[in-house]
Amino acid sequence: MKLKTTLLIFSFVLTHTLLSQNQSQLAPTPPMGFMTWNYFGLDIHENDIKTLADAMVETGLRDLGYNYIFIDDGWQGGRDNKNNIIADPAKFPSGMKSLVDYVHTKGMKIGIYSDAAPLTCGGYTASLNFEEQDAKTFAAWGFDYLKYDYCGAPADWQTAISRYERMAKALQNSGRDIAFGICEWGDRSPWLWARKAGGHLWRTTADVRDKWKSHAPAGSAPHELHGYGAGILDILEINAGLDKYAGPNGWNDPDMLVVGLYGKKGAPSTGLGGTGCTDTEYQSQMSLWCLMAAPLMITCDVRNMNEATKRILTNKDIIAIDQDPLGIQAERKLKTDLLQIFVKPLSNGDVALGILNTSDQEQTIEVNPETLGIFNKRKAKDLWSGQTMNTGKRIKVKMAAHETKVFRLSE
Ligand code: GLA
């Protein structure tokens, strides 16, 4: 009898440990996929999710690694008489389980959204004090990821940490592997505590808008950006300095890709001056996000992409920089008023070198890799043109305003 009990306890501890280990390893490389927020806002419908999943497969995006569909805010329909959270039946008439099954049959994973307060940012039912119950519901529906927001919750760090820990534990006890995205916009330096609290990624800034940069004063802290509407450069400015916190299963999240939005549709991305970017700027966002090992969440309408958008989102060589298994976020080695330089070591010994022309003019930039601590790399492949050159002592490039070039340097 005693032996049986000991065995039972042992097997419980073992299963629990294995589950926790699995849970902590749900994002070995930065998650990639489509997130509904920037384009659809709160106006989401199951048909959109289905046709988006279809498009992710047909365009080849899924096979390039973009294998999640993330349903953001606006899906909720309150609670039933047993306090189970339910989906809005008008938006999701077939129910969440059937939608999740559909996405899974497409060979994709699916994520959902809630908030650590009574209501979400959009004013919908959220999970405070229902953590266990909601985590079980998300697991029963078959979700693989939860983005957990922080609107309507107290500002202090301690409450934030404990509310995120509570949901992380609830997910760990839900019986399903569910990755956990922490979204408190960098206001409480989540890079210092989010991994330990059970997060696989943490937003580092205010919401991205579809623009190159805001008028926020230089050196603004994450929370100061909210009112200005953060552009690509504002977000870069904060996220680039956080490289030492990122790594497998714990990523800095500089928010979604605005690539291909062109200032159209969703109020979230067009708000606060989000009037759109040029293709050069979109290509820069993709380059910089990949150098920073960021989660890659597409938000443009993948059912109707133009050629430029397809080219930017489907560049295998650039995606490989983001998804490199070493999981090192590029270090920003140089920042002047005119340019920035990034270096990201890769798993096979190659090095990714990123050069960003922040000026509003075309300029020719020369870089000597040795001054950046990169030695014995004789070849440089320009990952956007596909051309490889011998580096000699320096790499000399003509760059358009706001352009980023990424080179893969090898022996
Ligand atoms: C916050 C988040 C966004 C989005 C909205 C939904 O603003 O930062 O990414 O999830 O809430 O209401």
Image (spheres, helix red, strand yellow):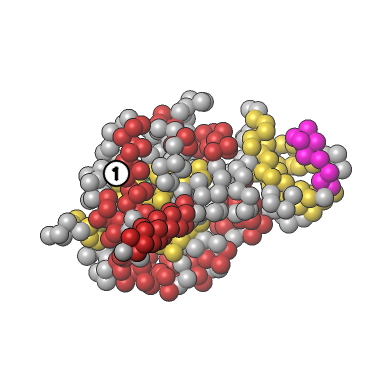
Q: Name the quarter where the N terminus is drawn.
A: bottom left
Q: Nearer the viewer, residue 360 or 319?
A: 319
**Picture residue at 46% right of the left edge, 67% below the top:** 108
Q: Is residue 265 above or below residue 95?
A: above
Residue 307, image x, y percentages: 58, 61
Q: Nearer the viewer, residue 161 or 153?
A: 161
Three-letter code for the amino acid on which mark 1 is drawn: Ala
Q: Is residue 141 magenta?
A: no
Q: SS class of the residue under badge 1? A: loop
Q: Nearer the viewer, residue 90 or 139?
A: 139
Magenta residues, dominant SS class: loop
Near mark 1 (Cα within 10 A), the count class, few <14, some 14-19 or many ≥20, is: many
On screen, residue 385 versus residue 179, left or right, reads right
On screen, residue 374 versus residue 134, left or right, reads right
Please indicate, yes or no, whether residue 384 appears anywhere in the rendered image. yes
Tell me the residue that label 1 is attached to: 116
Residue 342, image x, y percentages: 66, 39
Residue 232, image x, y percentages: 52, 41
**Picture residue at 82% right of the left edge, 50% below the top:** 411
Please indicate, yes or no, whether residue 276 appears anywhere in the rendered image. no
Q: Which image quarter: residue 176?
A: bottom left
Range of magenta residues: 370-379
**Picture residue at 25% right of the left edge, 45% below the top:** 128
Residue 49, image x, y percentages: 37, 65
Q: Is residue 16 above or below residue 287?
A: below
Q: How many marks can you see?
A: 1
